[in-house]
Amino acid sequence: MPERFTVTTPIYYVNDVPHIGHAYNEVATDVLARWHRMRGDDTWMLTGTDEHGQKIMRTAAANGVSPQEWTDRLVETAWKPQLELLNIANDDFIRTTDERHKVGVRIFLERLKEAGYIYHGEFEGQYCVGCEEYKTANDLVPGTGEYEGQLVCAIHSRPIEIVREANYFFKLSEFGDRLLALYDERPDFVQPEHVRNEVRQFVKQGLNDLSISRNTFDWGIKVPWDETHVVYVWFDALLNYITANGYGVDEERFERRWPGVHIVGKDIARFHAVIWPAMQMAAGLPISEHVFGHGWLLVGGEKMSKSKATGIEPRQITEVFGVDAFRYYFSSAIAFGSDGSFSWEDLDARYHSELANGLGNLASRVIAMVHKYCDGVVPDVAADAELQALMADAVGRADSAIDTFAIHDAVDAAMAIVERLNGYITEQQPWVLAKDESQRERLGAVLATNVHGIGTAAILLAPVMPETAQKLWAAVGGEGEVSAQQIRRAHEWRGTGRVTTVPPLFPRIEQA
């Protein structure tokens, strides 16, 4: 039986168009899914959109359309096209306005109510519409500029609203000890470590029951036993991870796909590592395998944000550098799990040094030499032992890095092959060897080693740069799809024994 790997992005809030902060998450999740497919795992990647709540309702009204019209428009013109643009190979796309989601949410709520975890009560609190969340004193900071003298949300820098409601509540307060036990028993449940520590500290301070319905507006899923209330947007949204795979409707499919791994931004890790596992415990479900809270993309020292005019749309980058270079940069330039600063200068420098001059130049030189010195036939000799050992080590390091979500380390391992091969060519000087008939055998070994190394690197880079890797793979005589290769045995590949041609993979870009 193959291993199961179910992985999810968060579902993205469709009050505006996506920016590279969303793309960063999508690409990372896609790289993980593609890697596991190349291991032979039973892989399923889910993404989608979060379409309910007060913020959506207000945004739609401001644009003179209904909430449903607004979400339909954004999903079809912005969110789904971004997946296509970035070559994201998701297996499913869920919308919280889908009927299958609404059915699953109602089933889940009824089960929690029957189990005694839901009650009716009153609540007053400080609410951030941007986060769709009640805030504690620790979540607020003094405002600046036009909001000076007011407390504002630390994430959105906008004033909170005092909201008093009579709602339905989930008994979250009953799950503190069980959550702490979960973090102790499964220390890798929340990653990376600094996120786990923050989550653990939050739970240790004590949990309040969670208001899970609203009755002051009607854009949402109706509470099944009281249709004057709609389900709180976060409670609704978290359930997408199970409603998309058959919860309550198709138990065989649900058992095959659950539990899963959640790749989320650190700012929403608390929802996924506290509220969501408590919900699963209450419903008697297997708990998610991992919650990985990655860092923020920073522009000018601030988190990527449309409201702060720091949002950059992916197309602005892909139109200049291409899709695979976009995917490569965001998979390698930032340690996955840490905050990272984006700059055009860094992207340009890495594109030219690592891709154009590194990978692209290596491939074009080696293939040209095999054509020139061997009529396109790859010499049938084993790769140099030192280089073969380096390739095997790189494959092992890359694969191990994926198990700890260290995508950047996996890319580094693959690119270590490229870097070593470029140095190896400089050392061995095949153009000199070609002039000496007595060095013919040595020339063959050098060229065969390079061809084999490029093919190995192509397999390892396939989850990151699918189109480029396929071009490399075909050029060095790889058969079929590079994505069909067993990634854990990348260094053992065998091809047709002939090279073809490789197009310019990373053309130089002259900045205006």
Image (cartoon, grey):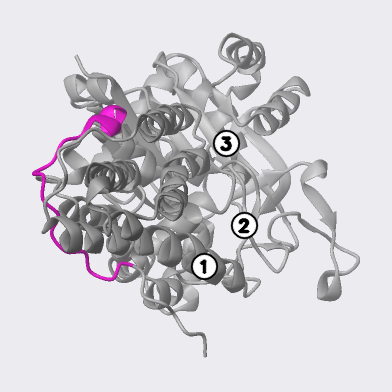
Q: Which residues are the magenta region?
A: 487-505
Question: Which quarter of the picture shows residue 185?
Answer: top right
**Residue 289, above or below 30:** above
- Quick check: can you spot residue 14? no
- The residue that label 2 is drawn on is 129
Q: Residue at x 38, y 27 (%)?
A: 260
The residue identified by callout 1 is 58
Dot 1 surroundings within 10 Å: few (below 14), some, or many (20 or more)?
some
Looking at the rendered structure, the kind of residue marked 3 is: Phe
Q: Position of residue 342 (x, y in %)?
A: 60, 64
Crowd around label 3: few <14 · some 14–19 · many ≥20 (10 Å): some
Residue 494 counted in the magenta span: yes
Q: Earlier in the sequence, mark 1 or mark 2?
A: 1
Whole-percent x, y for residue 233 in the image: 49, 46
Secondary structure under the numbered disc 1 in the rendered image: helix
Element type at mark 3: helix
- Marks 1/2 in contact by CB < 8 Å: the verdict is yes
Residue bearing mark 3:
271
Measured Cα–Cα span from mark 2 to mark 3: 16 Å
